[in-house]
């Protein structure tokens, strides 16, 4: 089976960016989650990709367990700490690394 090479100098087609309304050069990009349809390179890199990263970060943050009623405890000695799997002091950190 022979494959046709895509042209390297794609010209502006009749598509218009759904975000900025300027003509799209090449094939365009999926504008989801910012808009429905195709967007230009500039809007893709400046608006669509950052929106996707923000959405992924929100999903990741939702996966972190809620703080227990008594708060987080030091992984080494059980003392209070601010974050899950954290150490209360450099001494406990060093002990945990042994």
Image (cartoon, grey):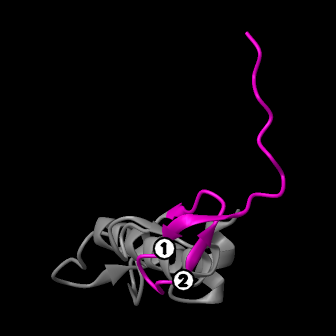
Query: Which label's residue is closer to the chain start, 2 or 1?
Result: 1
Are the residues tagged 2 and 1 within 8 Å (C-beta)? yes
**Looking at the picture, how far across and down is residue 3, in whole percent?**
75, 23
Residue at the front extreme of this rendering:
14
**Looking at the picture, how far across and down is residue 86, in whole percent?**
49, 78
Crowd band around label 1 with a 10 angstrom C-alpha radius: few (<14), some (14–19), many (20+):
some
Residue beneath disc 2: 22
Crowd band around label 2 with a 10 angstrom C-alpha radius: few (<14), some (14–19), many (20+):
few
**Looking at the picture, how far across and down is residue 22, in whole percent?**
54, 83
Judge whether residue 20 is colored magenta. yes
Judge whether residue 7 is colored magenta. yes
Residue occupying the point 61% across, 77% down: 45
Q: What residue span does the magenta drawing correspond to?
A: 1-29
Residue occupying the point 73% across, 9% down: 1
Overall secondary structure of the magenta section: loop
Residue occupying the point 53% across, 62% down: 29
**Looking at the picture, how far across and down is residue 37, in whole percent?**
38, 64
SS state under label 2 = loop
- Taking the image as shown, residue 9 lies to the left or right of residue 67, namely right
Please say if 20 is above or below 5.
below
- Nearest the camera: 61 or 29? 29
Please say if 83 is above or below 32.
below
Please say if 42 is above or below 63.
below
Give the numbered dot on residue 16.
1
Give the numbered dot on residue 97.
none
Residue at the top extreme of this rendering:
1
Residue occupying the point 76% across, 28% down: 4
Callout count: 2
SS state under label 1 = strand
Residue at the right extreme of this rendering:
8
């Amino acid at each position: 089976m022979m494959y046709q090479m895509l042209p390297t100098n794609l010209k502006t087609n009749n598509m218009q960016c759904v975000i900025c309304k300027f003509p799209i050069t090449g094939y365009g990009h999926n504008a989801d989650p910012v808009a429905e349809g195709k967007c230009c390179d500039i809007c893709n890199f400046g608006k669509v990709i950052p929106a996707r990263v923000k959405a992924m970060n929100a999903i990741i943050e939702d996966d972190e367990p809620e703080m227990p009623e008594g708060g987080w405890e030091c992984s080494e000695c059980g003392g209070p700490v601010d974050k899950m799997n954290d150490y209360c002091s450099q001494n406990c950190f060093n002990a945990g690394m042994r």
